[in-house]
Amino acid sequence: MNTIIIRGLTKKYGSIVAVDDLNLTVEQGELFALLGVNGAGKSTTIKMLSCLIKPTSGDASLLGDSIISNPCLVKKKINISPQETAVAENLSVLENLELIAGIYGQDSKTAKKKAREIVEKFGLEKELNKKSKHLSGGMQRRLSIAMALISDPQILFLDEPTLGLDVLARRELWTSIKELKGKVTIILTTHYMDEVENLSDRVGIMAKGELTAMGTVAELIMQTGTSKLEDAFVVLSGGVL
Amino acid sequence: MKMILFSKRNTKEILRDPINFFFGLGFPLVLLVLLSIVNSAIPAEAENMMFQIGNLAPGLAMFGSVFMALFVGMLVSKDRTSSFLMRLFTSPMNAMDFIFGYTLPMLVMAIVQATITLLASGAFGLEINANILLAIALTSLTSLLFVGIGLFLGSLLNDKAVGAVCGALLTNVAGWLSGVFIPIDLIGGAFKTITNILPFYHSVEAIKATLSGNFSQILPHLTNVMGYTIVIFALAIIAFEHKMNGENI
């Protein structure tokens, strides 16, 4: 079943085309990695799909609702973990989680229960009452993703979720993300090729606003006649090996 | 519900910063004590009524509320630059949830601050009567001007710029042009004309009229302040909605 159907999605800023006629479908429970160099159009695509900005033309259907005609319905089904950690600094881990749960309509009792469950899942039990500004970078990232998941989204956008993390923290976060596979449809953007190899079901490569290639990691390597994803990415992004 | 949750979060975010606590509640009290000492040192024959408690208390009630611009401006700006707002913009919250969610805590803080300042003024000779309740309500109303300024600037500038504009520039402009610290009538001329055009002096005069029971004098001053407040809030809502629907979040 297709959870995300994108048809002719385009975003222009004056004469600059940030995203050009994007067509794509993502299946339920799939982890789709969107790759591209800086300025390729990944973040703009995510912003359009999460109803943060309006497309210049085209549309996308998320679980049957259009991002243009029904953004309010779309917003109830999605959540996002932005590039920055995006947590309320002076609120504790528990308060951050309860805030987001409440905003998505959960009553106080349910929010508390869900918060307790999710901190366990993300290994944040010991940090429960700590102000989020006092958490390490890795813990803040975990909290950020936990905040995105507490609303039980059917679609999750992870925008460079491991940016700036050390190797151990990244690996721990990968484990948490892997556990979501099959249950939540995830669109992931990242610059780390090993992350894509470890996590993604399929990969889309964007260059200059266009989707230049799509397939599994193995398919992209085969298509370019290269030996690893990084080389395939360079070729498909218009670079030189 | 969403608006209340967001308001609670904003209240915690501001009050858990000790610097905010000092400037919000302590600074007007420090000024009250210092300027009362200055007043007691002025000889009676100088006939300088500026720092007499009847003038000082409403002035400080207004001046304290200027810091609401700094608090809300910094909060909005930090929420924007840290992408916390981006997260919330993808949630089912609407523009009014955000505007009221930022405004309500400021209104409550302004009420608490005015209550403390005016009641403390009682120790320096201000008559404590029912007019104080009305003066507190009026201060909360005039504080909306500064909340609006904070919302507007927070939607446009980064937190450093908001700190400079609201923390340094606005507090000075509001302080000097309100007549709290300098005698406007004595200076007169263009200076007095400017203070009459801008809302700061009128805020103080409206609170002063309330405290002294001259209710007929409130409306002309309040009209000026509320006119500015409506304009700045309209601009703040436009700027905020632009960010909500815009490209540069």
Image: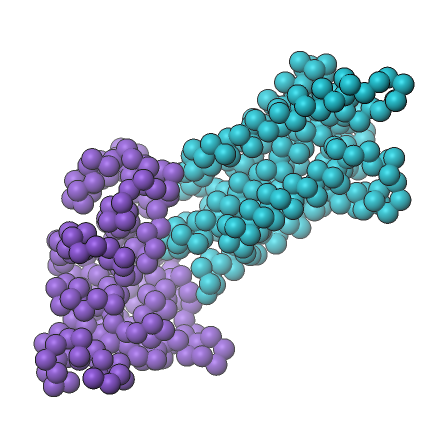
Q: Is residue B91 visible?
A: no
Q: Residue at x 50, y 42 (%)?
A: B102
Asked whether, in this view, residue B201 is left or right of residue B68, the answer is right
Q: Say if B21 sits above or below B235 in the image.
A: above
Q: Is residue B144 above or below residue A44?
A: above
Kindly identify the residue that appears in the image at 52 percent across and 50 percent down. Answer: B160
Residue A124 vertical placement versus B61 (above, below): below
Q: Quadrant of residue A120?
A: top left
| Chain depicted in purple | A
**Residue B191, position as x, y percentages in the image:** 83, 44
Q: Quadrant of the C terminus of chain A?
A: bottom left
Q: Is residue B78 left or right of residue A239?
A: right
Q: Nearer the viewer, residue A198 or B231?
A: A198
State which quarter of the image contains the N terminus of chain A.
Answer: bottom left
x then y, percent, for residue A133: 34, 42
In the image, A117 versus B49, the foreground residue is B49
Of residues A98 and B175, the one nearer the viewer is B175
Residue that appears at 87% across and 35% down: B186
**Residue at image coords 10%, 80%:** A227
Camera-side residue of B190 and A186: B190
Figure quadrant of residue B166: top right
Q: Colour of chain B?
A: cyan
Residue A150, position as x, y percentages in the image: 25, 46
Task: Tell me the quarter of the picture where residue A70 sits.
Answer: bottom left
